């Protein structure tokens, strides 16, 4: 509707204040009550403080893999360095394999239902697998150390406290049974290949590991229940892996006895790979791997790997491995990208895996720092997606005929990017996964999204874009947790810890801060905390400190609440300044009065009342029967002249302008305040997009109005036209309102609802 309003009323509207929201739930309330106070260890800018410290643990291990019994035996010497200012009376060690012990709390607390149970779920229910570490010795200089095992944690009681600045060496011996991953699950274990009677091992959490001791948690000794992952200190490793003599081993670290375990030809190929930056070079070919599959070697071979400044260690071993590698050049150092995979992974793995590793290193490094380690490895393991320093285990198996679906192809590339990306978060930027899953998974998923988009235009990323999180955000709040929830207590784990934080960061980059400010702040965080232990607050503070953008409202809304985005454009009113010129305004007013439709009674009376009383008796007419309020009189003209003479030049310019004023009213229905991105379309089909920061909601978190003016007339208005803010209801984002049809299909009940080709490649080969 077009309203003609007086200038005075328009000015009053423009400058009238909006009622203050004085509740205690203001969306822009600062986070100071929710976050730790800055101190000498972690300062107010989000950087490590001048007295920041972290303890470290160095390991020397001898590990033996018994392929016949699927058993690992190990002995380790741990050198624990107490760099804290505290004397430590005891040490805490993680026994992660105990999550698979028959008495594990993990089994006890799992909820289940018989309805919808699968064979696999029932097999796991009936499993009598004897898992868990069997500790055979804990000693110091040959003397037994008192120790207490509490489920997945072991406390070692020292005879005398380990004083600040001192170190201690102690030894642990153990063994455990390796789990079949496809039968009872697990982040590591083995896969059995019945056709050739072989196994492929991907091994992690295979040794008792030191817990983190720091200024935030003291000892991080929360029990491992299976979901909340790991908090591990940095250290140096020397690990001797004794495996069957026909196995090929992939591992964290650098192979220090290559001449003892590789053939001359393999060594030569490895040297060629160090110079190949375009295509991977095969170190072990598929033909050679297939030959090894048939071998019956009974001898053993020891592979020795050394790694510096890593927080963990993982490895893989199999006679089935094909091995390829290529070099990735960086400003600071060259890195080897490698893949290990059985023939069952081809043709996907030989075509994509190592190149996905290389692309990940290039992209992640551009947003953080040059990859500091000598190698990054992708290992093929069915149904896996798990990460360790320099090595990760990834799914991606085509059908037996070599065909694969697009979901399998892009899923495999995506998981390799994701798991290799974990080298940055949390392997180097070493957050506490046992407490905050989102700090590694969310930040990593965000960079995964950026990397996928550099891999292939329109890569079908599962997470990252704002539109991908809408269904989750608008869901049942009783089944949604804030991102800032401990790992074990999260509802909808994937959406909460991966999808929502990744989307939040992408919105922060694209819509709130802009790419330049965001990228600088994000890189600052990465470089401040590489090889250190950051907390969520260190991240929040650094992002603000390095950008001069107050983001407390954003962290509060996206990370501390379950609010969602639903901003409604409730009303649009169109105003023009009254010229006061009666020769203009009165004809407009007359035309407007004629715009109203005639009511039904008037229409019918014209037909049914032949004559009125006044029409029969003209004496009933008086002045008002001939008066036209829209006639322009001399008095009107004199009044207008006096009004014009009383205006100064700037007021006269406003009066004579042709501006159209639009007052837009918005309401925040979802609770999450966000910027307003408003696209105006004019009568000449041109558009203009205006971006208004979220702070427009600072005085009233729920209802606001704003006036815009243009010389051209507006024919339509769109809120969030490019779907940047994860608005959960776009039906209230347009003026005039749009009604968008939803396509539906009619199903033939005689046919399966799921009919259709999931693997178009296979279908194409049939033609």
Image (cartoon, rainbow, N blue to C red):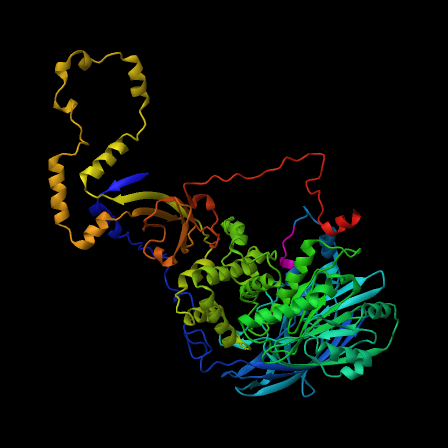
Above or below, comparing residue 334 to residue 289 in the picture:
below
Q: Nearer the viewer, residue 636 or 440?
A: 636
382 horizontally vs 433: left or right: right
Where residue 406 sits: x, y (%)? 68, 54
State the image coordinates of residue 534 (x, y, percent, origin top left).
51, 73
* Position of residue 89 in the picture relative to residue 616 (left or right): right
Total count of labels: 0
For the magenta stretch, what is the residue range?
108-112
The answer to whether residue 248 is magenta is no
Say whether residue 221 is visible: no
Picture quadrant where residue 623 is located:
top left
Rendered view: 189 above or below 752: below
Q: Nearer the viewer, residue 645 or 125?
A: 645
Where does the image place residue 521, in percent across and percent down from the top left? 46, 70
Q: Nearer the viewer, residue 395 or 163?
A: 395
Q: Quadrant of residue 636?
A: top left
Is residue 109 within the magenta segment?
yes
Is the N terminus in the top left, top right, bottom left or bottom right quadrant? top left
């Amino acid at each position: 509707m077009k309203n003609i309003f007086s200038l005075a009323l328009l000015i009053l509207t423009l400058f009238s204040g909006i009622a203050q929201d004085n509740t205690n739930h203001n969306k822009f309330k600062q986070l100071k009550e929710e976050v730790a106070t800055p101190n000498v260890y972690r300062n107010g800018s989000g950087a490590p403080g001048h007295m920041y410290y972290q303890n470290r643990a160095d390991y020397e291990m001898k590990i033996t893999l018994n392929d016949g019994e699927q058993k690992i035996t190990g002995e380790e010497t741990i050198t624990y360095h107490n760099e804290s200012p505290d004397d430590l009376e005891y040490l805490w060690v993680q026994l992660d394999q105990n999550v698979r012990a028959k008495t594990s709390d993990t089994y006890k607390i799992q909820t289940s239902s018989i309805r919808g149970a699968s064979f696999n779920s029932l097999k796991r229910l009936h499993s009598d697998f004897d898992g868990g570490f069997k500790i055979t010795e804990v000693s110091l200089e040959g003397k037994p150390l008192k120790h207490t095992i509490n489920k997945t944690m072991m406390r070692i009681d020292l005879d005398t406290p380990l004083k600040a600045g001192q170190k201690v060496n102690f030894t642990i011996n153990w063994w455990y049974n390796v789990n079949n991953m496809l039968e009872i699950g697990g982040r590591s274990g083995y896969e059995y290949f019945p056709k050739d009677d072989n196994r492929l091992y991907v091994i992690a959490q295979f040794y008792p590991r030191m817990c983190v001791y720091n200024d935030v948690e003291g000892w991080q000794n929360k029990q491992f229940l299976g979901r909340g992952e790991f908090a591990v200190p940095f250290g140096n490793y020397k690990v001797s892996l004794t495996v069957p003599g026909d196995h090929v081993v992939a591992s964290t670290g650098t192979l220090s006895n290559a001449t003892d375990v590789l053939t001359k030809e393999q060594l030569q190929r490895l040297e060629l790979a160090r110079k190949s930056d375009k295509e991977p070079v095969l170190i072990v070919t598929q033909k050679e791997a297939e030959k090894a599959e048939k071998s019956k070697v009974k001898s053993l071979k020891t592979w020795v790997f050394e790694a510096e400044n890593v927080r963990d260690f993982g490895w893989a071993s199999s006679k089935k491995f094909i091995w390829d590698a290529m070099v990735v050049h960086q400003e600071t150092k060259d890195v080897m990208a490698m893949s290990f995979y059985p023939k069952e992974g081809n043709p996907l793995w030989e075509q994509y895996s190592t190149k996905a590793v290389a692309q990940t290193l290039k992209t992640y490094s551009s947003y953080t720092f040059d990859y500091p380690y000598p190698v990054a490895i992708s290992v093929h393991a069915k149904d896996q997606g798990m990460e360790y320093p320099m090595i990760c285990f990834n799914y991606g198996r085509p059908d037996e005929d070599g065909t694969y679906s697009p979901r399998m192809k892009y899923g495999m590339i995506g998981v390799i990017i994701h798991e290799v990306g974990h080298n940055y978060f949390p392997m180097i930027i070493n957050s506490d996964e046992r407490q905050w899953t989102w700090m590694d998974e969310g930040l990593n998923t965000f960079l995964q999204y950026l990397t996928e988009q550099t891999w292939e235009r329109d890569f079908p990323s599962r997470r990252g874009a704002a539109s991908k999180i809408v269904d989750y955000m608008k869901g049942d709040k009783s089944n949604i947790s804030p991102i800032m929830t401990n790992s074990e207590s999260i509802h909808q784990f994937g959406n909460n810890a991966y999808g929502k934080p990744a989307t939040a960061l992408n919105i922060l980059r694209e819509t709130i801060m802009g790419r330049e400010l965001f990228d600088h702040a994000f890189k600052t965080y990465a470089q401040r905390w590489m090889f250190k232990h950051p907390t969520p607050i260190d991240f929040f503070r650094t992002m603000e400190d390095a950008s001069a953008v107050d983001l407390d409202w954003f962290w509060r809304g996206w990370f501390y609440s379950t609010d969602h985005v639903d901003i409604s454009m409730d009303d649009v009113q169109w105003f023009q300044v009254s010229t006061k010129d009666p020769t203009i305004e009165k004809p407009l007013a007359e035309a407007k009065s004629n715009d109203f439709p005639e009511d039904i009674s008037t229409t019918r009376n014209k037909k049914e009342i032949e004559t009125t009383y006044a029409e029969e008796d003209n004496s009933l007419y008086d002045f008002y029967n001939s008066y036209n309020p829209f006639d322009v009189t001399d008095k009107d003209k004199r009044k207008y002249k006096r009004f014009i003479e009383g205006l100064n030049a700037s007021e006269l310019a406003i009066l004579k302008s042709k501006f159209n004023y639009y007052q837009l009213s918005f309401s925040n229905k979802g609770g999450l305040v966000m910027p307003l991105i408003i696209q105006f379309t004019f009568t000449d089909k041109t558009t203009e997009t205006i971006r208004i920061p979220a702070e427009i909601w600072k005085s009233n978190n729920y209802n606001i109005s704003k006036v815009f003016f243009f010389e051209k007339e507006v024919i339509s208005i769109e809120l969030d036209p490019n779907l940047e803010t994860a608005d959960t209801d776009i039906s209230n984002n347009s003026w005039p309102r749009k009604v968008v049809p939803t396509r539906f299909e009619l199903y033939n009940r005689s046919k399966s609802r799921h009919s259709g080709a999931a693997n178009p490649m296979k279908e194409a080969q049939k033609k």
